[in-house]
Image (cartoon, helix red, strand yellow):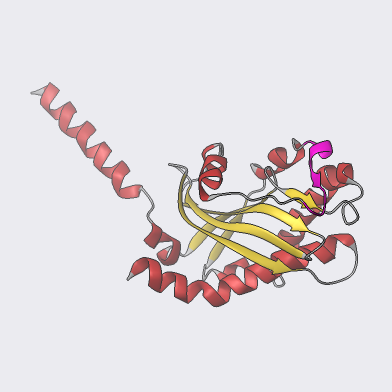
Amino acid sequence: MKKAVIIIFLASLAGMTTLKAQSVEDVFTSDEVVWFGLDFSEAKMIGPEGFSDPFQIVNRVYRSWNNLIINEPNRYNIKQSFRKRTVHNDLSVVTPRNTQVDPDELVLEAWETHELSEEIVQNIISEYETDHSGLGLVFIIESFNKATEIGTMYVTFFDIESKKVLLTKKMQGETGGFGFRNHWARTIRNVIEESGDLYPDWRRKHTD
């Protein structure tokens, strides 16, 4: 009898775990999200004339770009664009990943190209270790291109516990503003704002 009770209890726990798993619908129905920041671990800067100090980019500017989004939420309005009531900020995953980038391998020649794939995005998310649960959001940066003045990235929602990508969209943003940090940060801001414009279309496509 006790053995039967234990089996039923374990089966019940398994059912609860299944119910907790996030799906693509949760991207649009959840009222909160964990913002994990900008992941530059597989990014490339294209055009040496625009990225002359890769050591400073890796060791200082990556952190500055990430902090800028958190410190200026009205300009980089993740909450508004993605229709969330609450955004929890946690850079503890991307910070060490970004600082492990080799500066000597960061910058490509202007004629070179660099592309990620959804499979690579999933592989990146699979490496995340965190105590959070629920819905996660991260921007996986593909490239900043000096020749085109465009930043390319994957806007990626994922189930934190299973590390499964629920929705990822390849987006591009144009540069703008003065100073190296702000010039390229504008690409992030533009992607956030454009994502807000496209969000209703994403919802219809993935929930209807």
Quadrant containing the N terminus is: top left
The front one of 89 and 104 is 104
- The answer to if 106 sits in the magenta stretch is yes
Relative to 57, residue 130 above or below: above
Q: Answer yes or no: is residue 140 visible.
A: yes
- Number of numbered callouts drawn: 0
In which quadrant of the rendered view does residue 205 lie?
A: bottom left
Percent of width and height locating residue 162 = 43, 41
Does 181 appear in magenta?
no
User: x and y percent of residue 169 in the render?
Assistant: 54, 61
Write down the quadrant of residue 185 in the picture.
bottom right
Residue 91: x percent and y percent? 67, 47
Where does the image place residue 75, in percent across and percent down from the top left? 72, 72
Give the residue at x 55% y 47%.
Answer: 121
Residue 80 visible, this angle? no
Q: Which residues are magenta?
A: 102-111
Image quarter of residue 102: top right
**Position above or below: 129 against 108:** above
Task: Say if 88 sits above or below 149 in the image.
Answer: above
| Front one among 156 and 79 | 156
Q: Tell whether 179 sits left or right of 21.
A: right
